[in-house]
């Protein structure tokens, strides 16, 4: 069983199975617990009736609890998608970061907790090489259902430590950009760029609800100063720079 030297406690969860089709873990997926306490989150993640689990949980004070071995498939992503992959659980290692989330006041992530996230993530990446753009938020792979770890999570700090993909967000201007009910080539180009990065967004040329929630998810990760679901110049320029950084090509029509 894979264990990291940073683990403070082992609380095995029964909620796991084998990874399917021999797929490697090439996604690091970060969540917040969205519960009132870390202990409550641990109990739920270890409850066989809950049908959910994770590989690691990071407590507010920085303690790290392991629940599922890294070579096994923990049940943390749910219905999700990234770059054509729909079984994210088979391709990922899941870290739950204790934070009450948007339903419990959404507090800041303490410095000690962020240091623990960085230490654990670097340790995981040393064993499981992953491209930076596959260090993801739960909201990235399930934008219609999830907001975590949310706009307060310090992705820049992770990137500076060598974890994940990041560019400095384009400054927010006074333009309205694209929004609900807009349609045409500009919307199609936006959808193509979001899909090229990995998001599950239909290529319709219409700025529909699915496009809006996907833009919001992108903003929560990469343009955190304003989460409004509108594709303004700041959002689109930030996305373009991210794509340029990985040399991604827009899918053909």
Image (cartoon, rainbow, N blue to C red):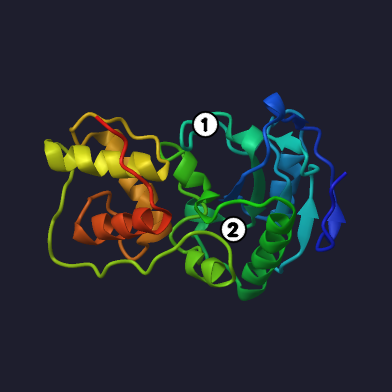
Residue situated furthest bottom in the rendering: 111
Q: Under tag 1, what secondary structure?
A: loop
Residue situated furthest top in the rendering: 21
Which mark, by number, is residue 85? 1
Question: Residue drawn 48% across and 59% down?
Answer: 165
Question: Front-most of 195 and 66?
Answer: 195
The mark that comes first in sequence, 2 or 1, is 1
Q: Which residue is mark 2?
A: 99
x, y percent for residue 126: 72, 58
Question: Residue drawn 53% across and 59% down?
Answer: 164
x, y percent for residue 253: 24, 29
x, y percent for residue 129: 66, 52
Question: Front-most of 5 and 14?
Answer: 5
Q: Is residue 52 left or right of residue 179?
A: right
Q: Nearer the viewer, mark 2 or mark 1?
A: 1
Question: The N terminus appears in which quarter of the rendering?
Answer: top right
Is mark 2 in CB contact (under 8 Å) with mark 1?
no
Q: CA distance from mark 2 to mark 1?
A: 28 Å
Q: Is residue 135 left or right of residue 117?
A: left
x, y percent for residue 23: 67, 32
Q: Under tag 2, what secondary structure?
A: loop
Mark 2 Cα-neighbour bin, 10 Å: few <14, some 14–19, many ≥20: many
Q: Is residue 70 left or right of residue 175?
A: right
63 up-or-down from 195: above or below: below
Question: Residue drawn 63% across and 37% down?
Answer: 91
């Amino acid at each position: 069983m894979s264990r990291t030297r940073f683990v403070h406690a082992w609380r095995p969860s029964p909620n796991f199975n084998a990874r399917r089709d021999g797929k490697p873990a090439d996604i690091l997926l970060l969540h917040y617990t969205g519960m009132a306490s870390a202990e409550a989150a641990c109990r739920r993640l270890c409850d066989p009736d809950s049908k959910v689990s994770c590989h690691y949980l990071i407590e507010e004070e920085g303690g790290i609890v392991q629940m599922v071995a890294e070579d096994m498939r923990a049940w943390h992503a749910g219905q999700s998608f990234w770059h054509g992959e729909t079984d994210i659980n088979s391709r990922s290692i899941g870290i739950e970061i204790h934070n009450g989330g948007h339903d419990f006041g959404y507090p800041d992530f303490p410095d000690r907790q962020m240091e623990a996230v960085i230490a654990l993530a670097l340790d995981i990446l040393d064993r499981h090489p992953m491209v930076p753009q596959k260090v993801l938020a739960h909201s990235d792979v399930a934008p219609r259902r999830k907001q975590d770890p949310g706009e307060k999570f310090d992705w820049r700090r992770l990137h500076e430590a060598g974890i994940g993909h990041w560019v400095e967000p384009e400054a927010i201007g006074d333009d309205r950009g694209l929004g609900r009910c807009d349609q045409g080539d500009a919307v199609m180009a936006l959808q193509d760029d979001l899909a090229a990065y990995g998001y599950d967004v239909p290529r319709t040329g219409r700025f529909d609800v699915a496009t809006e929630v996907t833009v919001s998810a992108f903003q929560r990760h990469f343009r955190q100063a304003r989460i409004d679901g509108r594709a303004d110049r700041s959002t689109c320029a930030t996305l373009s720079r991210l794509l340029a950084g990985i040399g991604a090509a827009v899918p053909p029509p």
